[in-house]
Amino acid sequence: MEEDLILDVENLKKYFPIKEGILKRIQGYIKAVDDVSFSIKDGETLGLVGESGCGKTTTGRCIIRLFEPTGGSIKLRVNGEMVDLMELDDMKAIRRKLQYIFQDPFSSLDSRMSVRDIIAEGYKIHNIGTRKERTENVQELLERVGLRSYQMNRYPHEFSGGQRQRIGVARALALNPDLIICDEPVSALDVSVQAQVINLLRDLQEESGFAYLFIAHDLSVVEHISDRVMVMYLGKVVEMTSSDELYTNPQHPYTEALMQAIPSPEPGVTTGRVPLSGDVPDPSDPPAGCNFHPRCSYARDICSEEEPELMQISGKERHFHACHLAEELDLKGYTLRKEETV
Amino acid sequence: MAETLMELVDLKTYFDNEDGLLRAVDGVSFEIEKGETLGLVGESGCGKSVTALSTIRLIPQPRGYIAEGEINYHRNGEVIDISKLKRHGKKMRSLRGNDIAIIFQEPMTSLNPVYTIGEQITEGIFIHQDADKKSALNRAVEMLKKVGISAPESRIHSYPHELSGGQRQRAMIAIALACDPNFLIADEPTTALDVTIEAQILELMRDLQSEFGMSILFITHDLGVIGEMAERMVVMYTGKVVETGDTDEVFKEPLHPYTQGLMSSIPRIGSKERLIPIKGSVPNILTLDQDQCYFASRCPEVMDICYEKEPPVFGEERNTKCWLYDTKEEAV
């Protein structure tokens, strides 16, 4: 095992039971996360993209066990040793190392607590410092995320959306975590404020060196912030590689379709675009074989019969894909599409 | 020169709120030509939706009203000032849904859950056209086919909850286009959708526009979508238009510092350069002193005059509301 891994997730599964009838018998399962494996290195940002319902938020929540995973292992490095979170009875000590930033800055802050209490709650729970030290830390954190220290006695409703998200970031930083899971941290914000928060997240990472699992659906934001990107579709990882590689040289037809669908901020770049047909299938009744084959324009017989496994591309380290045909297909990335039309 | 379909002249839509008079739309002027797509961009709360709702007189009641200005709609050589019509009057009703149609952002909340898709499409046809039940239903099926819903004969009997998000938005478009409108308002039609579905809907709207030839007012906060859809664009900030021009030109050389800030705030794929955001956040327009540029407090190129006087609009077709472009001043 590599030394510098901070998180190592193997075969993570989360099945939600579907209960029907008066007796609430279990009629089947929605496989929200189905056999997902990945790892994050120290100080690295792993982007996690996919459409709604693909299981990206469930993956994030399983890691901090806000959802109890159905199976698999989640190993986090604590004091130099990999600890399997699934075997722990008490996550309390671990949550110091593992923090979460939520999507909606309006519902994720307790409106009855002052900013000071929100940020210092972690200190209270873990019994860190005296009252005075805690207050000093809160003041320092507020300055670090671009707010003023005198604002600590205010309540969340007195802040704008962007400022609230900064409070959420300060709360996550309070306990000096090694890994922060960001679940769509900027998608509720306006474009101009979004850029401020993205810059803040990057600066803080440079200062403190923690790793991010960055969950988002906006492909240009993910490309901007991530070192590596993982693409999920219907509970499974379909491709994972460095972000440059993913956007220039995708190996899975779904990734290609995502790249083609990005609306381009350069006007006139629309030609040669084939939008993906159809909708995401019902997750309680996924198609046989490859999950993506009903929408895939390259699909062949094998795709509906056999489920592809996540494989490493020969000759390319850390580029994984789950497609039977990847070796034969010549798929287009985002940058290629742009160059063609120029 | 293309024909004008609708022109807004100094439109002011206000809301009489408890905490003061909210100038949601404050002196907005622009034109929409026949058959073109005009993009309307801005951040949340800038008044872009209220502008659109004003043109079909659907401003939230009882607090909202059109205080001043004209909305001139050109129909067969006749010019109708929509802002002077009675909200529930016969003429307004003959325009709304028939000449002017709207697609909303959230298809689940804007479709009626207790009526089938077919009933919702035919409702407009019955009101505006002299149609019997059979021909209206045929029209509904035809519309569903046009918007790419499979098995339309059976789908007209479906309720909105039985459709997926993308299909619901398709059904919304079918309802809007059922009476063959000349002017379609699309208020963030793809914001609630996933990126692959969004691409489908944008493609569909482009195809339908070339088939039906209607003008589209496309409202969005996503500059990428504007770049793909609109020939011309209008940028709004705090209830005012700050810049107008051809999309290509605005993208290539944004004039107003706000537009420049928006452009440098979006991450571009293939460039890991640090983003340059606009500092601060959108001010509360209730508390702002009126006689100034509302962007002054966030503007990197702010001058003394910006705090003293509201800038007029400089330029004609390609215009901006910013003191930086005051050529007379420079000459002195």
Image (cartoon, coloured by chain):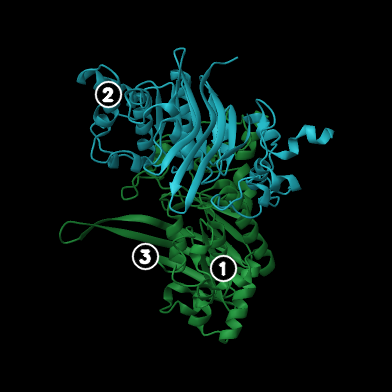
Chain colours: A green, B cyan
Q: Residues within 10 Å of mark 3 (few under 14, many from 20)?
A: some
Residue matched to label 3: A70
Residue matched to label 1: A179
Residue type, numbered disc 3: Thr
Q: How many marks?
A: 3
Residue type, numbered disc 1: Leu
Q: CA distance from mark 2 to mark 1?
A: 59 Å
- Above or below residue A173? Residue B214 is above
Q: CA distance from mark 3 to mark 2?
A: 55 Å
Report which quarter residue A97 is drawn in: bottom right
Tags 2 and 1 touching, CB below 8 Å:
no
> Could you say whether the residue bearing mark 2 is in a helix, strand or loop?
helix
Q: Nearer the viewer, residue B303 or A174?
A: B303
Q: Measuring from the top left, give residue A57's x and y in whole percent.
A: 45, 58
Chain under numbered label 3? A
Q: CA distance from mark 1 to mark 3?
A: 23 Å
Which residue lies most toward the left here?
Answer: A22
Residue type, numbered disc 2: Ile
Which residue lies most toward the top here?
Answer: B77
Residue matched to label 2: B127
Q: Nearer the viewer, residue B303 or B69?
A: B69
Q: Depth-wise, is mark 2 or mark 1 nearer the camera? A: 2
Tags 3 and 2 touching, CB below 8 Å:
no
- In the visual, does B159 lie left or right of A286? left
Residue in the picture at 47% in, 34% down: B52
Q: Residues within 10 Å of mark 2 (few under 14, many from 20)?
A: some
Q: Measuring from the top left, give residue A194's x and y in whole percent.
A: 58, 52
Q: Residues within 10 Å of mark 1 (few under 14, many from 20)?
A: many
Q: Quadrant of the N terminus of chain B?
A: top right
Sequence-first tag of 1 and 3: 3
Report which quarter residue A201 is drawn in: bottom right
Chain under numbered label 1? A
